[in-house]
Image (tube, helix red, strand yellow):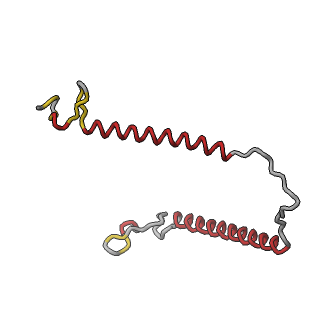
Amino acid sequence: MIINGKRINDMIRIGNTCISSTMIVMILALVLIATMAIASIYNSNEQGASLIDITPHEVDSSESVWTPTKEDIAYQDSMFAIVEQTSQDVDTIKEAIDHILYKLERIEHADGTIDSIRYIEGGAIDQSRNQ
């Protein structure tokens, strides 16, 4: 039997309504997504409450606090100097590249044209621009 263009064998009848298999999959997906959303909200509320610690931490005299030695400070200073030198080298290279690119954009040819690119037709430099 066919109802609204669908065969009755493809549908499940619940009371007076018929539900297709596509509708069942959609309902199951909706229930799954809703359950995951509720679980994630509930889980984040519980984790948030346990992660917040507002009690101040007092340092006991028995706890050892790390104090850097002269060697540690020298090592950190040398690392800082290396980082600074590298940064200056990168800036110098960037300025040189910008200078080269500016020169390439301003190349002046013998015929008076200013262009950084000469188009090659047939394997030779385009002579029509030189005339």
Quadrant in which the N terminus appears? top left
Quick one: 130 or 75, which is closer to the camera?
75
49 to the left or right of 114? right
The image quadrant of residue 44 is: top right
Quick one: 34 or 93, which is closer to the camera?
34
Quadrant in which the C terminus appears? bottom left
Quick one: 130 or 44, which is closer to the camera?
44
In this view, the residue farthest toward the left is: 1
44 to the left or right of 6? right
Quick one: 119 or 55, which is closer to the camera?
55
62 to the left or right of 31? right
Q: What residue do we see at 40% from left, 38% from top?
A: 31
Q: What residue do we see at 85% from left, 73% from top?
A: 70
Query: Compared to 49, does 80 lie above or below?
Result: below
Q: What residue do we see at 28% from left, 36% from top?
A: 23
The image quadrant of residue 92 is: bottom right
Residue 38 image position (x, y, % from top left): 50, 38
In this view, the residue farthest toward the right is: 61
Question: How many marks are shown on the rendered structure?
Answer: 0
Query: Compared to 47, does 108 lie above or below?
Result: below
Residue 86 image position (x, y, % from top left): 68, 70
123 to the left or right of 97? left
In this view, the residue farthest toward the top is: 16
The image quadrant of residue 88 is: bottom right
Query: Compared to 24, does 96 lie above or below?
Result: below
Residue 33 image position (x, y, % from top left): 42, 41
